[in-house]
Amino acid sequence: MNLVIDIGNTSCKVAVYDGLRLVSLQRFEDPSDLQAKAGEGYDTIVLASVRNDDPSLRATLAHRCRRFIDFNVDFVRDMVERGPEIYQYLRNMPDGMGADRMAAILQAAILYPQEDLMVFDFGTATTVEFIDKGYYIGGAISLGLNMRYRALSHFTGKIPLCEPQTVLAKGDINTISPVGYDLDTALASGNILGIKFEIEGYMHAHPHRKVILTGGDAKVFAAGLDGDVNVEENLVLDGLAAVAMQ
């Protein structure tokens, strides 16, 4: 059994894999919980984190497995030089690329090696990755949905902090009017529909690309988009599981 850990800006996901098969998945708000709950006796543990380095956590995890992989830019660059095939997908990655983005790119390239792709990840940031027949060519980063709401509240004097999840919980973003008639509907129009229009703009500009959505709000946006999209809920974790198998 292998353990893969995705520590994001907002929360962390911990998954147990039997090869490439997902066995269990947990979410924690505080990465410090990992030291008590991650367990031990794994063949491989892969850690991917976008937060500040935590030597104590890495040391703890390294003692709980036969092989520990700190999945970061330095590790991937070393693997690109050594030549394992899946890491060649990332040979054009920029300096400082987030571990979650690298894992998502790897898994997308593994799933669709002969296709041109756009991969949208709905997290703290909204990211877009462009992959041509298995090889990464570049991407884009914009504010995630919650960050958009929080920024509007933080940088204005009178907009309160509202929760977009109350709108998304209704399930169909196409019921949101593009013309807001009060604060809540104006925020939903500008931010939720703003992301929808952003994605559809990319799709219109790149009609030949297969579109993959992942992240917490992937299903909701997939249902509201005008066009064919593929939802891969655990794209990042599955990518880390593939790394554990190398």
Image (cartoon, rainbow, N blue to C red):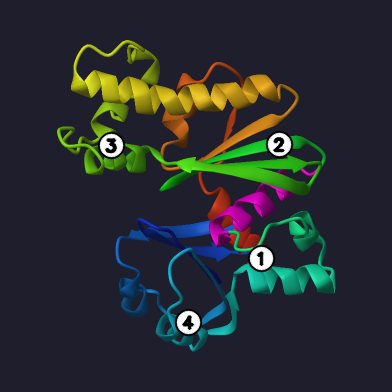
Give the amino acid type for the residue marked by disc 2 in the picture: Leu
Q: Earlier in the sequence, mark 3 or mark 4?
A: 4
Q: Nearer the viewer, residue 126 or 159?
A: 159
Q: Give the quadrant of residue 111.
A: top right
Q: Which residue is mark 4?
A: 58
Which mark lies nearer to you, 1 or 3?
3
The CA span between labels 1 and 2 is 20 Å
Give the amino acid type for the residue marked by disc 4 in the picture: Arg
Q: Secondary structure at mark 1?
A: helix
Which mark lies nearer to you, 1 or 2?
2
Give the amino acid type for the residue marked by disc 3 in the picture: Leu
Please state the extent of the stretch shown in magenta in the rendering.
98-113
Q: Secondary structure at mark 3?
A: helix
Q: Which mark is residue 117?
A: 2
Q: Earlier in the sequence, mark 1 or mark 4?
A: 4
Image position of 224 with respect to 83: above or below: above
Residue 101 magenta-highlighted: yes
Image position of 170 with respect to 30: above or below: above
Which mark lies nearer to you, 1 or 4?
4
Please tell me which residue is depicted at 28% across the width and 29% down the height of the picture.
169
Q: Give the quadrant of residue 207.
A: top right
Left or right: residue 235 versus residue 90 is left
